[in-house]
Amino acid sequence: MIFLATSKDKIYTQTLADIAKESGAALWTKEQFEKELNLTCAQIFLCATADTKKVFGFVCFRVYQDEAELTNFAILPSQQNKHFGTELLSFALTYLLNKNVKKITLEVNTQNKKAKKIYQDFGFKKVAIRKNFYEGKIDGELMLFTAPSKL
């Protein structure tokens, strides 16, 4: 089950912080997720079990008119390699494209091959490298997705 979080979903913010920590995603705290939920530009999509509604993944975007930035994305390690990340990202991108978002950017650790692969599979292209972006040692890769033109 995938759904767009609203301010009433603050009950999940500690879970989201735990998922981020366990999966090695951007380490946001419970408070950062709470602040994100209050931003009018933020869109947080949650992936949960259908029966218990236990959240095990998320993807976060900030949307500015017809552009968006993917700011955080994680699936619990125990749920990885089951296509949940692909389903979640597909759902979120479809939602954003239906809201007339034309460009989506993200930044990913150049050593995170798994993340880079999923983004490339969705059509994200490398546009720049941010030298020593992570901990002053590891480069970050800036990627861009451009919505297909309508015929």
Image (cartoon, grey):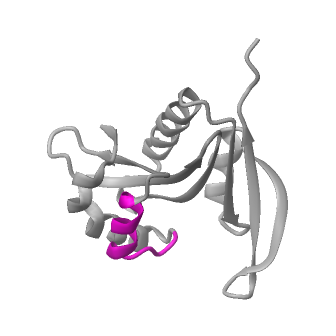
Left of 129 or right of it: where is 101? left
What residue is drawn where x is 58% and y is 54%? 70
Q: Main secondary structure of the magenta part?
A: helix
Image quadrant holding the C terminus, namely top right
Q: Range of the magenta residues?
A: 26-38
Residue 33 within the segment the image draws in magenta: yes
What residue is drawn where x is 69% and y is 35%? 102
Image quadrant holding the N terminus, namely top left
Give the x, y percent position of residue 107: 68, 62
Q: Compared to 145, does 147 lie above or below?
A: above
What residue is drawn where x is 65% and y is 65%? 112
The residue at the far bottom in this view is 136
What residue is drawn where x is 36% and y is 58%? 37
Give the x, y percent position of residue 42: 47, 53
Tell how many labels: 0
Give the x, y percent position of residue 95: 49, 32
Residue 99 within the segment the image draws in magenta: no
Left of 10 or right of it: where is 18? right
Left of 91 or right of it: where is 47? left
Q: Compared to 134, does 76 lie above or below?
A: above
Q: Compared to 70, does 83 lie above or below?
A: above
Give the x, y percent position of residue 53: 19, 46
Query: Which is more toward the observer, 18 or 100?
Result: 100
Can the viewer see residue 80 in this picture? no
